[in-house]
Image (cartoon, rainbow, N blue to C red):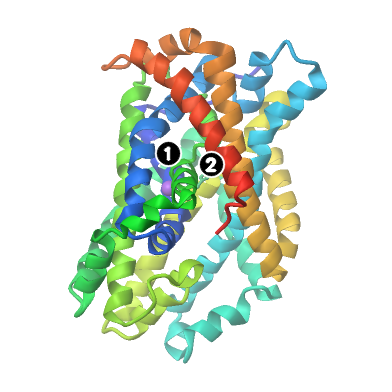
Amino acid sequence: MSKREKFSGRIGFILACIGSAIGLGNVWMFSWRLGQYGGSAFLIPYFLFLAILVPIGLMGEFAIGRKMKGGSFKAYNVILEKLPSGLRNTISAIPTLGVVGIFLFYAIVTGWIIRYFFAYVTGKMNEVANISDYFEGFIGTSDSIIWHGIALLIVVLIVSLGVSKGIEKINKIMMPLLFIILIGIMIRSLSLEGAMEGVKYLLIPKWDMLLKPMTWIMALGQAFFTVSLNGCAMVVYGSYLEEEVDVVNATKQIIIFDTIAALLSAFVIIPAAFAFGLDPQAGPTLLFITVPSIFSSMPGGTIFGILFFAGIIFAAVSSAINMLEVPVEVLKNNFNISRKKAAIGVTIIVFILGIPLDLNMNLFGMVADISSVYIAPLGAVIGAICIYWIYGTKNILPEINKGAAKKQGKIFELAAKYFFVPFSIIILILGILLGGIG
Ligand code: PHE
Ligand code: NA
């Protein structure tokens, strides 16, 4: 058997994980969730979960990947060895299927972003009289299919190059650029007249939203989604990790950078929306209608449009790479299919399955919600149970602590076993019962 691929080192690994974490969840979803769930009131449960639950989940996923030298499908198959093979394979496959479901709609949205980018580059955006009509005019039509295909082409090219030459390299370039762009645009956005109203909106909490269970459920879903915690995406990156890399510290850095990116995006989008009198609660269209309306009504808007959408392409592509890597690793290491064949095969399937979503926005919304609100959290819960309950904290702790400057101990074990796992299960069930979508 050929040697397992590896990241070249700590920085490459961390940047790849930051690339995975920072994505549409930050630049697209975060602002709309903030807008809909009480502004900074939403940040309270969100930060609580990011500080307490998410680190436990991430450390466990990195550690199990490194320990088992394999992605989630292999790892959970080993952990669940006592179960009959049909059941074991099914459970082990669920996290992967959840991420493929996310990939289905994510690739489509990435396509829209690439389309916008080109519309700015070619100057076409200047000729658009009504951005809302422009957006509504191509989503749900065959136009969307082409851009969807282009997005997938970029992703499959990078993944075909492999872990260190493709995934790691591209992230090393894209992530620093993304931050520079976001900071530059935020400065511009905050200096717009009327922007301070938006800042107030972000900073003054609507406390009553905290009384609604949905706020907590969505905060947990968002916290898991934003760091790619779904039982497999981070397991696979962990499986390419050198033994001595400190996953405790890496986890901290990933969460911090993801949070910075989310806040930067919110401080770009919401203040600008206020400055131009647009609805901060517009939700999904915030990025595609609100933001371009802002650019079109300000000096130098084209340049800002080009930079902003380039940055979002980086964010989205570096996440999509991780989504493709998950099934590719499964096929490569469990079914002996070459990386290139697996990457191309999965991409073609994802493209074909995605076409109906290109054409039907209701279907698109359904798949987006089901995969990100239910199946991905279910994957995270399956991962949590396998890692901390069945494999056990005793067994995983030494792997988490390997190379760690700050070792985890008894408190971590108790928190993982009696808090993280049950709490994740409860929120997942509540979310399903309350029909938590949107
Ligand atoms: N974390 C990514 C985001 O915030 C989404 C993602 C989910 C990435 C699953 C990889 C795997 O957009
Ligand atoms: Na994110």
Q: Which mark is residue 322?
A: 2
Counting residues from the start of the chain, the first of labels 2 and 1 encountered is 1
Nearest the eye: 342 or 203: 203
**SS category of the residue bearing label 1:** helix
Kindly identify the residue that appears in the image at 43 percent across and 12 percent down: 397
State whether residue 285 is above or below residue 203.
below
**SS category of the residue bearing label 2:** helix
Q: Quadrant of residue 306?
A: bottom left
Q: Amino acid at mark 2?
A: Asn
Left or right of 290, for residue 162: right
Q: Which mark is residue 59?
A: none
Is the residue marked 2 within 8 Å of ligand 1, measured from its CB?
A: yes
Q: Quadrant of residue 112?
A: bottom right
Q: Amino acid at mark 1?
A: Ala
What distance separates the C-alpha of mark 2 from that of mark 1?
8 Å
Q: Residues within 10 Å of mark 2 (few under 14, many from 20)?
A: many
Q: Which mark is residue 16?
A: 1
Kindly identify the residue that appears in the image at 46 percent across and 43 percent down: 220
Nearest the eye: 433 or 148: 433
Residue 186, given in percent of the width and then of the height, sits at 25, 65
Left or right of 244, for residue 331: right
